[in-house]
Image (tube, coloured by chain):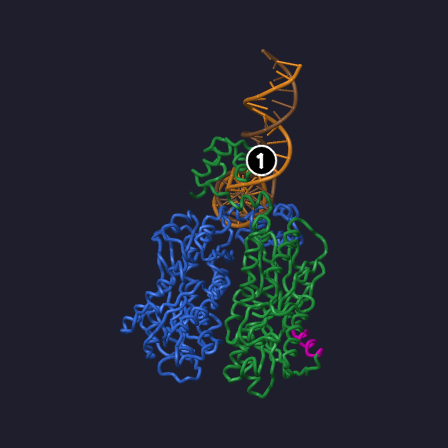
Chain colours: A green, B blue, C orange, D brown
Amino acid sequence: MAGVRLQDVAEHAGVSMKTVSNVVHSHPNVSAAMRERVQRAIDELGYRPNAIGRRLATGRTGLIALAFADVRLPYFSELANVISKAAAATGPGYRLLLEETEGTIEGERAVLSASEAGLVDGMLLQPSRMSSREIAERHGDLPMVLLGEGPAPLSVDRVMVDNVAAATAATEHLAALGRERVAFVGHERSGMSSTSRQRIMGYQEGLERHGLPVDHDLLISTGAITSQDAAIAVGAALDRGVRFDGLVCRDDLAAIGALRALHERDISIPDDVAVIGWDNIAFAATTFPSLSSVAPNTQALARVALDMLAERIAGFDGIGRHRVVDFDLVLRESAPALASTDAPGGELASVHAGSAHAISA
Amino acid sequence: MAGVRLQDVAEHAGVSMKTVSNVVHSHPNVSAAMRERVQRAIDELGYRPNAIGRRLATGRTGLIALAFADVRLPYFSELANVISKAAAATGPGYRLLLEETEGTIEGERAVLSASEAGLVDGMLLQPSRMSSREIAERHGDLPMVLLGEGPAPLSVDRVMVDNVAAATAATEHLAALGRERVAFVGHERSGMSSTSRQRIMGYQEGLERHGLPVDHDLLISTGAITSQDAAIAVGAALDRGVRFDGLVCRDDLAAIGALRALHERDISIPDDVAVIGWDNIAFAATTFPSLSSVAPNTQALARVALDMLAERIAGFDGIGRHRVVDFDLVLRESAPALASTDAPGGELASVHAGSAHAISA
DNA sequence: GAGTGAATTTACAGCGCTGGAAGTGCGCAG
DNA sequence: CTGCGCACTTCCAGCGCTGTAAATTCACTC
């Protein structure tokens, strides 16, 4: 099986290497008889084209790197799944090389300057810390598309969700439910990511639109992006007397932590405190109560990102394009739809303006 | 930046390609003066060695494929993270190519017979359906280590947790807590995976050791491996009158679904029903109540698997080796340690026989 | 001042594959 | 029966790099 080369097949079939290559690639200009003869030789020898040789000759590997902070974060693992499927269906069928940056600037630099070139055809990167200028400078000639919000270098493609608008929509939904003290949970205590920054901006905008208090006490930061840290932080806030009746969470992890802190203190959800998370991870549907969540359209995000990347790989060299994909506000028990019953339903409730749809599930 | 070749550097520095190559690889036998001169040329030209050219010459890519059912399953994403870190620290520093099989036989076949050879140096595969014979037949000459329990082909390396023993330990812990009707939740309704099969065997063994009833009603299967399906299945079982006071779950997803179904019906955990999950995923610590869980030692698993794979890649060609890594029984609120208070603690409670440790967290 | 061995550097031949140019054989018109 | 065009196949060069072997240089010794 091992080490069967194109040459071996050619000899076995008594033809030239190029003819075998043509058969492998279903090129035209190969007679049916010849095709069959070669195919038999291929089968008999168990020939597998060698990807590396091909790459060297063609300049393509069919690999793209997907780089983000940490696969363990459900948003990212779900994203990896979606992108991996979309990539397999793109052009020649790309496969994913996974790279984790740990959410640190060093990790991001390491990913960008991976000293070996040529291994991947392109890269999808969700930066958390690197400045747009640095990204623009460092990516060199590697085709690249940035994922997620944040400072957008003019020279690089980017696809994102409008975090500010989504945070505003989430906050406004709580206001519409009659909540008067809405807190924000889950941004990093030190070194806030641009993601957190934008969501907080949108949260503040939402509060202001409804004349609700914008209070520093209502910003509950966490040590790390984990549900455990969020549970601790929310618990501590409650214990030191911070009061709120609505919670916009940086992500579902924070929301799940908040759920736990509230449960521990017998605070009823959503009666006493309504909670909205972010990312609509799979667990959001089975927490108790189930979690309302901002749901970025990751399918669209994957599609758009891969299309742009494919264009770059194909040689497009224009200025950076910035695309925005839409999001839904999926409403479940923790912050139900406006005029809904308490019973879990499953149908579309309403559609917000712009790119926000509210769905009650 | 782009397309600077070894040759270009050589010309720029006025030396031969090989000398530049030697400098890049920090080979001995390069004089300091020469090294500096070449390095300057490298820097000036911004040369990046091309990974593909190197691969073709050396036969190594530094890539290993990690194949499992679905990254979205927290166990797998956490595993990917651990393996990715361990791989980066192994030998020359491997990187991970992610492959998803969807848990189907077709997906597994596709991964094994990826028509292109040579892209990865080796593969770690966690099969869910494929028979050991088929794996042994198909993997050809690709260095491979299997992850997880199941039928183990004699010719292939495998590293696993003793699922039977772990399931027995979990079941016995519930028995020790005085539970008398212990159910099992989360195996596939049709086409049971070998994982589920083994865990059920261990569950049954645990029941028998304590003279507890082994009742078909107590096997609560689900449609898919999701917490949502588990919530539905457990809810349905409760609603049709199945009674139990302990729950061994196929995985934490099933456990989380069970938690929700119990909550919905105001059944107290752990007072009315104690629950033990499996995998000890990150969320287990922040569910309400927090989840006791079987925790495979994934660090050890990654370490052992990569070491064996590295040996295979290096040419080892002996018979398949089967390694077992240990596991902990992490005890939290949903099925607390035996003589513990109700308050969450954080210290080691006890150590089981063999490779099972109970930890209360 | 030529000879010797060690230390460096260069030359060369591919790794497996593909693209384009050149070559082969065939059928058919003249 | 010869020549021509077409359809198909083979030949050749090279993608970027490395391993081996040969060549060069150098520091000394006799």
For this rendering, which residue is in front, A260 or A328? A328
The residue at which mark 1 appears reads as A28
A216 in relation to D6, above or below: below
Segment colored magenta: A199-209
Say whether residue B89 is left or right of residue A240: left
Label 1 neighbourhood size at 10 Å, few (<14), some (14-19), many (20+)?
few
- Asked if the stretch drawn in magenta spans residue A40, the answer is no
Q: Residue furthest bottom?
A: A241
Q: Position of residue B266 (x, y in %)?
A: 45, 80
Q: Is residue B20 above or below residue B103?
A: above
Image-quadrant location for residue A278: bottom right
* Chain of residue at mark 1: A
The residue at 61%/84% (across/down) is A244
Look at the picture and state if B72 lies above or below A255: above
- The structure residue drawn at horizontal position 35% and vertical position 56%, both measured from the top left corner, is B152
Task: Report the side of A243 relative to B98 (left or right).
Answer: right
x, y percent for residue B225? 45, 64
In the rendered image, residue A203 lying in the magenta stretch gets the answer yes
x and y percent of residue B42 in the render?
63, 53
How many numbered callouts?
A: 1
Under tag 1, what secondary structure? loop
**B318 displayed left or right of C28:** left
Q: Tell me the quarter of the image containing the C terminus of chain A.
A: bottom right
